[in-house]
Amino acid sequence: MTLMVACLLMACSSTKDNNLAYFKSLGDAPSGTLPQGSGSYPIRIQPDDELVISVNSAVPQATAAYNVPLDNPATRNAYNMAVQPRMQTYIVNEQGDIMMPVLGRLHVAGMTTAELANHVTNLVSANVKDPYVRVDIANFQVDVMGEVKTPQRIIADRQYFTVLDALAACGDLTEYGKRDRVFVIRTEGNQRTYHRLDLGDSNLFASPYFYLQQNDVVYVEPNEIRIDNSKYNQNNAFKLSVTSTIVSAVSVVASLIIALTR
């Protein structure tokens, strides 16, 4: 009997461990290579993106006119924060354009930051020798919701930001999160698309949704235990509320009876 109970406990423990494990498809091999996607998935500039564009050269005075002046705060999300002055940002309008000093209107939607930097470099090179242009997306953010330890909005500090980076920033999944039902919701043009990722499958690394894009939403679905607990808590709260109401009603009736009998 004792041996049977021990085996059952070991089986339950093994099942639990498997349900919580990542990359189970790697098996027991001590080393190996991970699947790769068919190509890279660079971030492309979209309307409403906020860009930081700096134009420099060996002679700073030669490129000064191509830069917007310093301002404080620098970005639209920092108006209530004490920040050091830095260059203002460019907001991409609905048509996908920005207005740069000297260069005027530029259509930037659909470009990567590297492509835009090269484009601006070519334009500035007509008047400045060997300019250096850097482009960054200032508002690259993703929302992480569901069964993670700290659901939050994350401001990504780099453009190649993965779903694993986002989950790690939130303290990882809780034990109630389904490792095989992690959804990435993405806005592409006028459509919202979604894709389900399985953290137990090493093919995750080859998915085009492995690398996140600006304004993605990562949602971790709860497992049955969390759902059952939620229902149990709601039922208990309802029963407690009903009981409290009945007790209150009985107390009022009793008070009225006592008052009338007097």
Image (cartoon, rainbow, N blue to C red):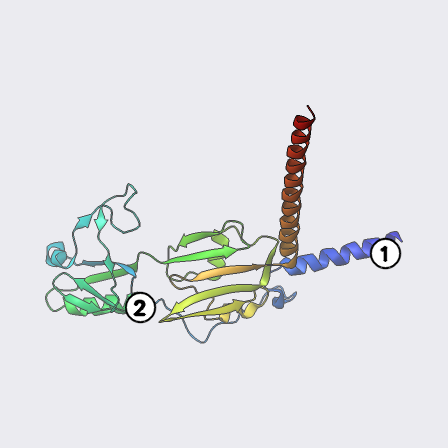
Q: Residue at x 49, y 56 (%)?
A: 145
Q: Residues within 10 Å of mark 2 (few under 14, many from 20)?
A: some
The image quarter containing residue 120 is: bottom left
Q: Secondary structure at mark 2?
A: loop
**Which of the image's four quarters has the C terminus?**
top right
Q: Which residue is mark 1?
A: 4
Q: Is residue 18 left or right of residue 199?
A: right
Residue 184: x, y in percent? Answer: 48, 65
Residue 27: x, y in percent? Answer: 64, 67
Q: Residue at x 56, y 66 (%)?
A: 198
Q: Secondary structure at mark 1?
A: helix
Q: Residues within 10 Å of mark 1 (few under 14, many from 20)?
A: few
Number of numbered callouts drawn: 2
The image quarter containing residue 131 is: bottom left
Q: Amino acid at mark 1?
A: Met
Q: Amino acid at mark 2?
A: Thr
Which is more toward the observer, 47 or 4? 47
Q: Which residue is mark 2?
A: 112
Q: Residue at x 30, y 61 (%)?
A: 49
Q: Residue at x 67, y 28 (%)?
A: 260
Mark 1–mark 2 distance (CA, rounded to whole Å)? 61 Å
Which is more toward the observer, 30 or 68? 68
Q: If you read the primary sequence from the N terminus, does the residue marked by circle 1 or circle 2 appear first?
A: 1
